Image (spheres, rainbow, N blue to C red):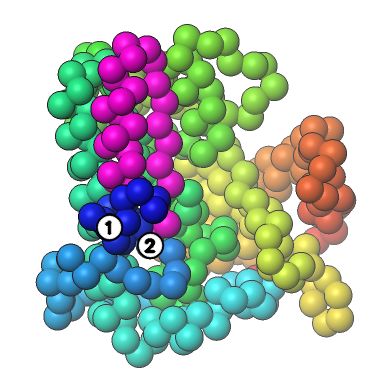
């Protein structure tokens, strides 16, 4: 990025400048090209571009309906052992919420600006009618929901991300259609391969998103896993999610910890304010989600890659047939 630093001293716009030049030069070759830009913002340390200091200055932000520690008391003890729990205070969601969120959105605004630089280059290069654009993120942020900060944990705020896809060649383009299908980042690989006219290998986990572009009411997954094997052992978790439900298993069981389950009825409780794992009325759903979870663990046992220490986690996440306590 040193090439662009003088004109664009902040990394976000320098990425935009790089992307703009890449598109301009690639289009001249009259060959297919692929550009992937991964912006550093809005990760920490928080250092927004001062060019946009006035955008959210003094703004008051509405807190979500699950903001604060009182809405996380039903979460597992394991979930409180990582840095996400303490960051509710250390990242100032608890006492400087408006200031923190103003900087957060300021960083995202700068990403939109840089994406616009690249989008303008696509138009100016004359390839806008034949260029597919996918806009997404690698994770969400808890931002004080349930009294947590940061990411990684398998809750909605940190696992859901924006996904916008635009294919100018398709009849549905420009219609601003919303798709409610269950999708995951595993779907980008087969999507891009199909767009490139390359056969999708049969052993990939994802499904092409193009089927949803054809029919926004279609479905490509019945369930997907949410995996965290990063950070302290205590916060490692495996979850499965469907359109209706989410089941989370926390395996850590040393000392006075016990394996813990959580179950959320997402269609009626999208803020995950009620763990219903021990509610009799939801026992049938619990059994169904446990079965889906067990199938994922079995698939892990059979197909985990033999590096990065992934294979042992199949045993760690195997819940067996034991009944485990509800989440606290």
The location of residue 71, given as percent across then percent down, is 46, 77
The answer to whether residue 174 is left or right of residue 314 is: left
Residue segment shown in magenta: 15-41
The residue drawn where x is 76% and y is 67% is 233
The location of residue 219, given as percent across then percent down, is 45, 26
Q: Nearer the viewer, residue 168 or 158?
A: 168
Asked if residue 196 shows in the view, the reply is: yes
Mark carried by residue 42: 2
Above or below residue 165? Residue 290 is below
Above or below residue 90? Residue 65 is above
Q: Nearer the viewer, residue 78 or 152?
A: 152
Residue 82: name its quadrant: bottom right
Count of marks placed on residues? 2
Q: Nearer the viewer, residue 37 or 266?
A: 37
The verdict on residue 21 being magenta is yes
The location of residue 240, given as percent across then percent down, is 62, 47
Q: Which residue is mark 1?
A: 6
The residue drawn where x is 42% and y is 26% is 34
Residue 278: name its quadrant: bottom right
> Residue most toward the bottom?
95
The residue drawn where x is 57% and y is 10% is 199
Mark carried by residue 79: none
Above or below residue 217? Residue 137 is below
Contact check, label 1 and label 2, Cβ < 8 Å: no
Between the C-alphas of marks 1 and 2, the distance is 22 Å
Local crowd at mark 2 within 10 Å, few (<14), some, or many (≥20)?
many
């Amino acid at each position: 990025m040193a090439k662009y630093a003088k004109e664009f001293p902040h990394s976000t716009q320098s990425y935009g400048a790089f992307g703009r030049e890449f598109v301009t030069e690639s289009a001249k070759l009259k060959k297919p090209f692929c550009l992937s830009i991964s912006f550093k913002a809005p990760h920490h340390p928080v250092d927004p571009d001062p060019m946009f200091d006035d955008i959210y200055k003094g703004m008051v932000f509405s807190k979500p309906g699950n903001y604060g520690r009182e809405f996380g008391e039903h979460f597992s003890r394991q979930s409180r052992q990582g840095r996400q729990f303490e960051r509710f205070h250390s990242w100032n969601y608890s006492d400087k919420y408006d200031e923190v969120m103003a900087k957060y959105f300021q960083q995202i605004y700068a990403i939109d600006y840089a994406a616009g630089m690249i989008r303008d280059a696509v138009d100016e290069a004359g390839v806008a009618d034949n260029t597919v654009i996918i806009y997404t993120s690698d994770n969400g942020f808890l931002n004080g929901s349930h009294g947590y900060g940061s990411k990684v944990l398998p809750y909605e705020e940190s696992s859901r991300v924006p996904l916008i896809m635009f294919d100018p060649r398709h009849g549905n383009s420009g219609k601003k259609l919303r798709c409610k299908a269950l999708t995951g980042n595993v779907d980008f690989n087969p999507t891009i391969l199909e767009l490139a006219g390359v056969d999708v290998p049969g052993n990939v986990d994802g499904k092409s998103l193009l089927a949803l572009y054809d029919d926004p009411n279609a479905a490509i997954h019945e369930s997907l896993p949410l995996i965290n094997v990063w950070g302290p052992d205590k916060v490692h978790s495996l979850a499965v999610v469907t359109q209706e439900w989410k089941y989370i298993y926390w395996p850590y069981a040393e000392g006075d910890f016990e394996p813990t389950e959580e179950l959320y009825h997402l269609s009626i409780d999208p803020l995950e304010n009620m763990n219903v794992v021990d509610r009799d009325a939801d026992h049938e759903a619990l059994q169904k989600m446990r079965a889906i979870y067990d199938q994922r663990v079995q698939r892990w046992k059979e197909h985990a890659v033999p590096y990065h220490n992934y294979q042992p986690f199949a045993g760690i996440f195997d819940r067996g047939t034991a009944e485990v306590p509800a989440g606290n």
